[in-house]
Image (cartoon, rainbow, N blue to C red):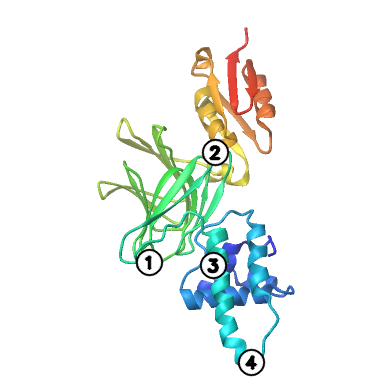
């Protein structure tokens, strides 16, 4: 599968009857073999009413398995229908095994939940049942029920960037213990780790409401960020650059006016390490810098230019102390 056309775009094209991403997908279909893959996905959608719910962008090997099952020699006409059903079933099975990791199966009438987790040091892309897309930052998880298309609610722990598919008859909400983010537009980010005092909601496109106890307390417009203090039970809204706020989805980190303890907490999630910070460095000084593809060692060397530190890395254990 051509990596220039992500799987979610192909699925959205199928489920929208060629209304979404039509130009990109139609160009992709011109390449040899791609039309066969598209047709089999369309058959899966027609027969099962379902599509892959979530996947890692690096699942190239899984798609190779799918293609080995759907590229079979054509049989005689009287065997075609039986073979087609077998192909679809095989493709569904392969996708379930290779892509639907974490989906729980239970009686249809019972409420069950699916949960997807991005390990620390990694990001995970999630395709929800309604074809909405979520990118999870390291150490984050998202949970939703098996009747999602009837009630589009997710529970987020950590940081996620959302691109929500419009469905005016079914609101989309992101729930936490303290507030709910009610989505009226399409593209936004939410940061809500259990061990953080502040919940952040930034809006790129569309409109979102901030609800507390099922009552709206604020409505954001593009370019605004809402910060909710869990301890003080207080909401603050300011204008900001959402692209900077969500720079992590482009493998960048931008720190503006943040203390070293705040930076360290984020770096633990970004690199998947545990950092022990010298209490003498908890001095309230705020730092500003941007990184992209730097290793942890290169990043610590950069911080050392801004604030004299000494650091040691032993596997996943990092120690940062104040220089004498």
The quadrant holding residue 200 is top left
Q: Is residue 3 visible?
A: yes
Tag 1 residue: 168
Q: CA distance from mark 4 to mark 3?
A: 25 Å
> Of marks 2 and 4, which one's residue comes earlier in the chain?
4
Residue 156 location, x and y as percent? Answer: 41, 46
In the foreground, 49 or 289 = 49
Tag 2 residue: 120
The reply to whether dot 2 and dot 1 touch (C-beta < 8 Å) is no
Tag 3 residue: 93
Q: CA distance from mark 1 to mark 4?
A: 44 Å
The reply to whether dot 4 and dot 3 touch (C-beta < 8 Å) is no
Tag 4 residue: 77
SS label for mark 2: loop
Examine the rendered structure and indicate whether residue 304 appears above or below residue 194.
above
> Of marks 4 and 3, which one's residue comes earlier in the chain?
4
> Of marks 3 and 1, which one's residue comes earlier in the chain?
3
**Label 4 Cα neighbours within 10 Å, binned few <14 / some 14-19 / many ≥20:** few
Screen quadrant of the C terminus = top right
């Amino acid at each position: 599968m051509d990596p220039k056309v992500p799987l979610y775009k192909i699925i959205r094209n199928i489920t929208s009857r060629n209304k979404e991403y039509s130009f990109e997908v139609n160009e992709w279909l011109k390449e040899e073999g791609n039309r066969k893959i598209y047709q089999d996905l369309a058959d899966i959608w027609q027969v099962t009413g379902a599509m892959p719910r979530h996947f890692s962008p690096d699942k190239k090997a899984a798609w190779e398995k799918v293609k080995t099952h759907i590229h079979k020699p054509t049989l005689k006409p009287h065997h075609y229908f039986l073979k087609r059903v077998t192909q679809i079933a095989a493709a569904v099975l392969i996708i379930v095994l290779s892509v639907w990791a974490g989906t729980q199966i239970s009686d249809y009438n019972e409420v069950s939940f699916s949960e997807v987790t991005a390990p620390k040091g990694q990001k995970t892309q999630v395709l929800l049942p309604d074809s909405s897309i979520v990118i999870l930052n390291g150490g984050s998880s998202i949970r939703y029920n098996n009747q999602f298309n009837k009630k589009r609610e997710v529970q987020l722990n950590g940081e996620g960037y959302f691109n929500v598919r419009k469905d005016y008859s079914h609101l989309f909400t992101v729930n936490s213990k303290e507030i709910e983010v009610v989505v009226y537009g399409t593209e936004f980010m939410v940061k809500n780790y259990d061990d953080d005092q502040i919940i952040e909601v930034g809006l790129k496109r569309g409109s979102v409401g901030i609800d507390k106890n099922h009552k709206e307390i604020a409505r954001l417009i593009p370019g605004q960020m809402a910060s909710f203090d869990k301890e003080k039970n207080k909401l603050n809204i300011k204008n900001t650059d959402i692209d900077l706020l969500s720079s992590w989805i482009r493998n960048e980190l931008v720190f503006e006016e943040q203390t070293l303890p705040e930076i360290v907490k984020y770096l633990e999630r970004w690199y998947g390490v545990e950092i022990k910070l010298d209490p003498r460095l908890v001095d309230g000084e705020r730092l500003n810098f941007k990184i992209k593809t730097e290793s942890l060692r290169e990043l610590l060397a950069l911080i050392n230019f801004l604030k004299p530190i000494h650091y040691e890395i032993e596997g996943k254990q990092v120690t940062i102390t104040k220089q004498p």
